[in-house]
Image (cartoon, rainbow, N blue to C red):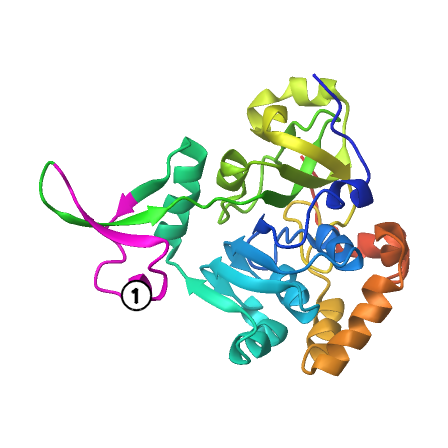
Amino acid sequence: MKSKLTSLKDAVSRIESGSTIAVGGSLLRRQPMAIIHEMIRQEIRDLTLLTWATTMATDMLAGAGAVRRWEGIYAGFFRHGLAPNFRRQVEAGAIETHDYSESATVARFRAAGMGISFLPIKSMLGTGMVHKSPDQIKEIRCPFTGDTYHALAAAQADFTILHGYVADEYGNVQWPVVRDSDDIDQMMASASKRLIVTVEKIVPHSEIQRRPSLTYIPHSLVEAVVEVPYGAHPCACDGFYDEDEAALKSYLAAAKTPEGTAQYLAEHVFRHRDHAAYLEAFGGRESLRALDVTGGAE
């Protein structure tokens, strides 16, 4: 096996402006924020985002003016309300949106993972979603029964970015025994063309071998893996740490206006050369351990 371990700057430098990016995580858990910060620092723009239930990752990229198109099931801040930058950009016509149901999004990533161009579903029949995305949803007839289906185009992303739990240097990524599971990160990984994963901790390969059944992303899918402690901050990484409520509220207060967003990005993204410097602005890893949950990665 080949080592896939690299720096965050190197991993993100592979992404070009104009790319289609699948962004992992669900709601306020495992948003790949360290990658998002570095994408903004490197001024990667004109992006199409494919997401599940996305929150801060999409909103911050929208606030940086980096998003052209969004396809997903939800963009907001869960119990904290709407996504202010994303909403403002959509209302201004700067971001083209394509809404899908959860089952439709699963079908799209499943098709990509199977290496086929589409999958048929019935769950969107009778909805207006089909009329908004005619380039990706087509009505078809079953050749066996004559039933009507919608053919959904496979979710084809140039890059997939995920934040995970632990991995070895080869890119074998494992989840903890106890975790939240309302995400499709594993499916996104299977559907990926070029996969970048940040993890809370790099562990020896022997640790991966000790519990192989916990490996949910094998090394063969991964192009680059980066050790980034608190890589989802200020969002949570289930089994490791909770959300930083104060930091989330500070961001949302700033994101109420374009000017506030610009100032926030200047202070919390562009000001810091890397993720370690970003963490120091929040008191460093010692201070952030107050967010840790019992059990760690066990």
User: Image point 64% across, 31% down: which residue?
Assistant: 222
Q: Is residue 211 magenta?
A: no
Mark 1, Cα crowd under 10 Å, few <14 / some 14-19 / many 20+, is: few
> Where's residue 16, x and y in %?
68, 49
User: Image point 76% across, 50% down: which residue?
Assistant: 230
Quadrant of residue 201 within the rendered picture: top right
Quadrant in which the C terminus appears: top right
Quadrant of residue 132 within the rendered picture: bottom left
User: Image point 62% across, 54% down: which residue?
Assistant: 18
Give 135 or 128, whichever is nearer the viewer: 135
Q: Which region of the structure is painted magenta?
A: 120-143
* Camera sees residue 39: yes
Quadrant of residue 56 within the rendered picture: bottom right
- Looking at the image, is 245 positioned above or below residue 152? below
Q: Is residue 123 magenta?
A: yes
Q: Is residue 102 left or right of residue 187?
A: left
Q: Amino acid at mark 1?
A: His
Give 103 or 116, whichever is nearer the viewer: 116
Q: Which residue is mark 1?
A: 131
Quadrant in which the N terminus appears: top right
